[in-house]
Amino acid sequence: MASQRRGAFIVLEGLDRSGKSTQAAALVSRLKTINGENSAKLMKFPDRTTTIGKMIDAYLRSQNELDDHTIHLLFSANRWELVSAINADLAAGITIVCDRYAFSGCAFSAAKGLPYDWCIAPDKGLPEPDLTVFLDLTPAVAKLRGGYGEERYEKEELQRKVRVLFHSIGKQMKGGKWQEIDASSSIEEVEKAIWKHVEPFSDGCTSSINGLWIE
Ligand code: ADP
Ligand code: FDM
Ligand code: MG
């Protein structure tokens, strides 16, 4: 029996200003051009529109103070509250392009000093992306892209630690599910490099979705 084709789950990760939001939007419109208006959807984490997302938004804009563990769990809860929507879209054949995911959750909190194993624990079992493309950029170059704004984590020293953690998270991802690209070239060049990795998934997938960080 032929297996049911589902949408692909594609994640873009990277430091602040590495080009994730620019590239996620471009990728969704490319997929829609190829497969139709309802074939792809853009998601982003944190999703600041939910009740939990509003608490996260206030924290990132330094309007409230939260313990590092508490905010970490809120970021994770913000993903779990959208899991049923993710699964429903994938099952309906819609490809999801997601701007940040659990890898940001782990990289940022571990960079702040929380233990790595503690950081990944609440995200274990989330839908595992079929592909994560890491847009690699030095914090120094990222900062030149208009400079950082007001948000809590937009500081070069923290971003340097986050980059190291992203690299070590990527090394532990098996089976080509993590691809790193140089995000310092032009928007068009980066788009091309991302597409090279995404194209094999442009027709969706037949495999079932695994649980993230579950052996
Ligand atoms: P992120 O979502 O990773 O923070 P954005 O996509 O918002 O990054 O891009 C941050 C800024 O850098 C924006 O002003 C954007 O136009 C610009 N930008 C994005 N990609 C590139 C690139 N490849 N080269 C130069 N500037 C870029
Ligand atoms: N961030 C994002 C985390 O610390 N943990 C997470 O789980 C996620 C998804 O929130 F500084 C951080 C990363 C970044 C900020 O910024 C969100 P954008 O501009 O909304 O991507
Ligand atoms: Mg962005």
Image: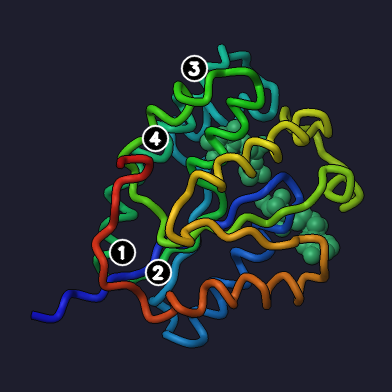
Residue 51 coordinates in the image, percent (x, y): 43, 32
- Label 4 sits on what residue type? Asp
Which residue is under mark 2? 95
Q: CA distance from mark 4 to mark 3?
A: 14 Å
Query: What is the secondary structure assignment of the residue under circle 2?
Result: strand
Q: CA distance from mark 4 to mark 2?
A: 21 Å
In screen coordinates, is 2 left or right of 52?
left
Does the closest atom of ligand 2 sit within 8 Å of the Cβ of label 3? Answer: no
Q: Categorize mark 1 by other alpha carbons within 10 Å: few (<14), some (14-19), many (20+).
A: many
**Mark 1 — residue?**
90
Sequence-first tag of 1 and 4: 1
Identify the residue at horizontal 34%, vertical 43% (top origin): 126
Disc 3 and disc 2: Cα gap in Å? 31 Å
Which element is circle 1 on?
Answer: helix
Q: Earlier in the sequence, mark 3 or mark 2?
A: 3
Q: Which mark is residue 123?
A: 4
Q: Earlier in the sequence, mark 2 or mark 1?
A: 1
Are the two marked residues, 4 and 3, in contact with CB atoms closer than 8 angstroms?
Answer: no
Q: From the viewer's perspective, tell me whether residue 126 is left or right of residue 22.
A: left
Between discs 4 and 2, the one toward the N terminus: 2
Q: Residue at x 84, y 40 (%)?
A: 148
| Secondary structure category for the residue under label 3 | helix
Q: Which residue is mark 3?
A: 70
The residue shown at (31%, 53%) is 85
Q: Is residue 160 above or below residue 195?
A: above
Query: Is the residue 159 above or below the residue 28 in the image?
Result: above
Amino acid carrying label 3: it is Thr
Beta carbon at label 2 within 8 Å of ligand 1:
no
Looking at the rendered image, the quarter that the N terminus falls into is bottom left
Q: Which amino acid, by three-letter code, is at mark 1?
A: Leu
The image quadrant of residue 189 is: bottom right
Mark number displayed over residue 33: none
